[in-house]
Image (cartoon, helix red, strand yellow):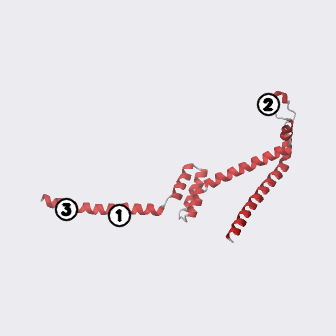
Amino acid sequence: MNVIKTILSKLATILMVLIKFMSFMALMLGGAYLLAPMGLINSKDIDMSLFTNTPNDTMMILFNSEYFSGYLFSVTITLVIFVIYLLWSLHEVAVHRAEKMRSSHVQLVFALSLCGLFIHKAWWVLAIIIAFANWSEIGESISNVLRNSRNKTNGLNNVPNEVNKVED
């Protein structure tokens, strides 16, 4: 029974990848069709004897095609949008980390992240530090330092009295 579920799960994954790929290609070809009129601005009357390494005639037919130019333009637009999306995801990594950790600093991290976007990148670095810091450990360490310093000062307050007794 588990083998059948595993096989069906793998087949479903493969089917979803194929569906996504076909959807992407349909979108790109649709973009090529819609953007093909922009390919008319290419200069097709170039004297190829000016170039030393010219493609063959079949490749020149492809390069001079308006639909090929439209396809390249749609791929370029898609690539630029994808890179902008990836940069935004990188920019928001601190906010997502703070939300994942259920930190009480989510709004502060979000505000610093926006300041990093519009004002200076140092604010974004501060947001990253705040989001990824383990505040319970930091608080415990600071409490231990304060607790130890109080114990040492209490011990030092007793020492002068003993020194004064020895001197008398």
Where disc 1 sits, the SS reads: helix
Quadrant of the image occupied by residue 23: bottom right
Q: What mark, if any, has residue 161 been given in the picture?
A: 3
Separation of residues labelled 2 and 1 (CA atoms)? 79 Å
Which numbered disc flags the more N-terminal residue, 2 or 1?
A: 2
Quadrant of the image occupied by residue 14: bottom right
| Contact (Cβ within 8 Å) of mark 3 with mark 2 | no
- Amino acid type indicated by mark 2: Asn
How far across and down, in percent of the image, does residue 132 sit?
Answer: 52, 58
How far across and down, in percent of the image, does residue 6 sit?
Answer: 69, 66
Where disc 2 sits, the SS reads: loop
| Contact (Cβ within 8 Å) of mark 2 with mark 1 | no
- Amino acid type indicated by mark 3: Asn
Q: Is residue 136 left or right of residue 22?
A: left
- Amino acid type indicated by mark 1: Arg
Q: What mark, if any, has residue 136 been given in the picture?
A: none
Identify the residue at horizontal 46%, vertical 64% (top origin). 136
Q: What mark, if any, has residue 53 been given in the picture?
A: 2
Identify the residue at horizontal 83%, vertical 52% (top origin). 30
Q: What mark, if any, has residue 147 been given in the picture?
A: 1
